[in-house]
Image (cartoon, coloured by chain):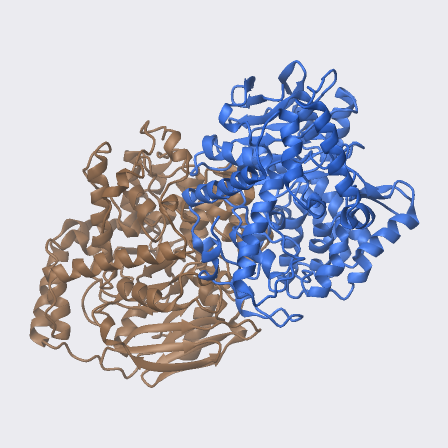
Chain colours: A blue, B brown
Amino acid sequence: MFDKVIRIDMTKIEATEEILAEQYKQLSGRTLSSRLVSDEIPPFADSLGPHNKIFITCGLLAGTTVSSANRLSIGSKSPLTGGIKESNAGGIAAYKMGRLGIRAIVLEGLREDDNWYIAVINKDGCRLKEASGLKGKGIYDKATLLYEEFGEKIGIILIGPAGERLLFTAGVANNDGDGAPGRFSGRGGLGAVMGSKHLLAIVLDDTGCIVSEAAEKDLFKEKVKLFHKGILETTQTNETLPKYGTASLVDVTNALGGLPTRNFQTGRFEQADKINAQSLYDTIKKRAGEGNTTHSCMPGCIIRCSNIFADENGKTIVSPLEYETISLAGSNLEIGDLDTIARINYDCNDYGVDTIDIGAAIGVAMEAGILNFGDKDAVLSLMQEVKEGTPLGRIIASGCAITGKVLGIRRAPVVKGQAMAAYEPRAVKGTAITYMTSPMGADHTAGNLVRTNIKPDMKEQLVVASRDAQIAMTIFDGLGFCMFIAASVKDRQILVDLVNARFGWDITKEDLVQIARENMILEREYNRKAGFTEAHDRLPEHFYEEENPVTGTVFDITEEDLEKLVF
Amino acid sequence: MFDKVIRIDMTKIEATEEILAEQYKQLSGRTLSSRLVSDEIPPFADSLGPHNKIFITCGLLAGTTVSSANRLSIGSKSPLTGGIKESNAGGIAAYKMGRLGIRAIVLEGLREDDNWYIAVINKDGCRLKEASGLKGKGIYDKATLLYEEFGEKIGIILIGPAGERLLFTAGVANNDGDGAPGRFSGRGGLGAVMGSKHLLAIVLDDTGCIVSEAAEKDLFKEKVKLFHKGILETTQTNETLPKYGTASLVDVTNALGGLPTRNFQTGRFEQADKINAQSLYDTIKKRAGEGNTTHSCMPGCIIRCSNIFADENGKTIVSPLEYETISLAGSNLEIGDLDTIARINYDCNDYGVDTIDIGAAIGVAMEAGILNFGDKDAVLSLMQEVKEGTPLGRIIASGCAITGKVLGIRRAPVVKGQAMAAYEPRAVKGTAITYMTSPMGADHTAGNLVRTNIKPDMKEQLVVASRDAQIAMTIFDGLGFCMFIAASVKDRQILVDLVNARFGWDITKEDLVQIARENMILEREYNRKAGFTEAHDRLPEHFYEEENPVTGTVFDITEEDLEKLVF
């Protein structure tokens, strides 16, 4: 049965198993993790203290053959924002959870001694194992050692040294089907929460697991086929994403004046053609070797938007190399060189930090004159400082907001303490409304409107579109789906059909919307109790007053405009 | 007439003079600066951006012969807390303002070029002068150069390199009658606000000024005599403070278990007798030379609680050396050595930072293992890093809250981002209620209850006492009075008598209370608009859960208890 909850108490070093309570049964991914955060973590709790918890969830279709349905969702109270957080990623961990019949893994309790642990979960249950020897090792070495011990087929959820050091950009990684531990729930510092509990990794071994069949087996098969047909018949999911991946956004945002460049000073990068999708594609193809332009991050994903980026000798530098990193660690630093960006990405992954917040922090450090825009060597040596944990490295790894404060730079592109993703807010206004209002801080995945046709002066429509996008994304996040299915899902009926066929339920697509709306209200209410007000739903001041040189516009959405944003 | 406002626009490099608006006439010090902050600075304003301002005010009795009535009050939106701030200090600047007939100096506008300025105010008005050559110099050198240029009798309001670098612990200094620029409006990072405007110093030259006589000259003289008689007939103000100064609190808090020791881990310091008032007094007396146990910080102050601390050769190390610094840079760091503490104090002064927040930050760095508790040499060399602005130095100079975040230490003693003063909150619960609820963050001067007789379990009475202390302190701060007159003021009638005699008014002591109450409501409302909620009126979590080893108590004032705190 797909209804287990593994609860790991790191103070007692004890793992117990329970059945998911009835009231949570229809929730999964973000809607389940946020509900558990709200129910179990006091809003005043210190994010790195004894009362914070981590809820690791998967989607209702995890472990099945459904494409793009195996996102891993990690929820907690964020040390970075101080509010509720959900950060999801691809990889194989959620698939393994599904096969193990686990709906949620709960980490609770604090450890402040010198002992560090891993949790090993298999069909017989969960056991905790002292593993202090792994402490201090990078994510890649940790993964290698875990494969040696537990076999190469395991799923791994793990943190790097950044999480151990409680740094606010620390993410939680999991691995892909090739064994690369590069799928990051990167945002919000959730790796630091895991670090505060001294749990270095969760090993998911599904050997011997038999996934229970769908309640309506034939119907399920039929619906899966129909769903996959939709993906295969959509240009975006069958051509653009498999070939170019997320990097195709470089040309889109650059054209809009929305590609963050030189610490968000402007939105167009003169070297964009060196880092855009075509350049990425051509480079990978030309170098061949281990490189690959088309790659699945999740088992069974037929979109395959991921990639493997190899060096001139065909050896992998990093996988994947994606748009947000290409911009934040590229254009935002005036770096028009994919190799350098890939190496920054690798260093971030290995240390276990969010490339978005790190890229934004380095942009701020460049504006402060610590290093020069465009100086590749200086960035790579700064990344070494980050990994070594020097004082400057710790500042950067504390994220963009703190870097701005320590270095005296008020033009730090952050909302609720979290760095903006790669959409310059004065040019990509719809996404910026999401930055302002999402309980998550400046996350693009909370509701991206980069491709909207709504004109920038149609404020009310933009606000409503952001709200609707936030609900739509919550529906995907709440089912464990990758948001890239959006283009192929003309009607959400297919999503409920899949769920209903698996579980023998009869939920409607209106139910999905209702669950998403309730989730948004709950997340916002949690943040309100944690101390957020409308004062926190603002962009940094300079975006309202200084023009984006490309578009000639300032950001002009006011508190009054946001009154339409009712969930 | 005592009604001028000097408004300095640092964007235009322009100073204008206006008359204080009628509605502000009865306000001064904190009540005037907070009202101006509320009226002129949007609550959402970036503290280091173009819309923040600084309001420098003095008391209604400034420039007169009244003892202890020349506190300088500096108000702004704080970069450290993000809320309204008033930080006041002794020194001669407020006295000079009074003699110049200036009720307020307003600094507004931002500069982001390479030019730095000073403002020179004399009887003919205010002019701005380029003074980029002063940039980067320590507070003491800056003062020396200003004395050389403008004579030794000037008042100076100035910032150090920390303010120029926009660091959040940067304070604003002014000078005493001996020329030492060691009187700090230290709290809340107001030096960074001044730095953001590129104004390095304000020179106050009262040559040729004739202070207008009191409206009721004879009555005023009589009331001054009566007021001074009160001071001279009170043991606290005529014996204890002149002899021992604020250092007498060391024994008081140590006995209570409330002397912050080793990053507030405990409240009793085994070396307290090396840093207490008797030790300070004996050391100064023994060394003689430039040292002095009894010293006025303000012209005409007859309490003279200040001191000059000299080294073994009788050469001044620093003036003054006070309780908060002795604890935060002493017991809190396990340093039982007045010379080391005095040197830390000097370094803080010279760089222009708050000794409280710096001491607390170093305590956190010690808990993080960056240096060891008790390691004097390591602290002094860390202070050199602070002054040089190395990355670690910048972390420390960003204050205790940020230091905790960057170094992964959740046990940082802060409220609203500001470090606690030298009263361990589990032992000195009344003062801790003030820490929680003062709009200023963890300031002891906002309402200190270290000497209360209310028992720790009488929560309601403690909450009410904190409220009353906050009102009482606001009355003093709102008149430019030093809080040390409190012991000698049995009846506030004397305070209104002095004001009424000077101005020919007929305000009552009930009016004083009403003005103070309205001020508290206004400050809290400003903070509410700036984004503060009851979630911010809390101490760090561990104080509620881990016992003070001396008292065996945790902090136990809840949100419900605070409902009695109505102004």
Residue A171 visible, this orientation: no
B174 shown above or below B415: below
B509 shown above or below B442: below
Q: Quadrant of residue B541?
A: top left
- Report the front residue among B559 and B18: B559
- Report the front residue among A224 and B361: A224
- Report the front residue among B297 and A463: A463
Q: Quadrant of residue B125?
A: bottom left
A304 shown above or below A329: above
Q: Position of residue A452 (x, y in %)?
A: 65, 58
Instruction: Give the residue drawn at x 41%, y 68%.
Output: B53
- Report the front residue among B60 and A99: A99
In this picture, residue A547 sits left or right of residue A253: left
- Quarter of the image with the N terminus of chain A is top right
Q: Quadrant of residue B266?
A: top left
Instruction: Give the residue drawn at x 31%, y 57%.
Output: B523
In this picture, residue A320 sits left or right of residue B290: right
Q: Position of residue A286 (x, y in %)?
A: 92, 50
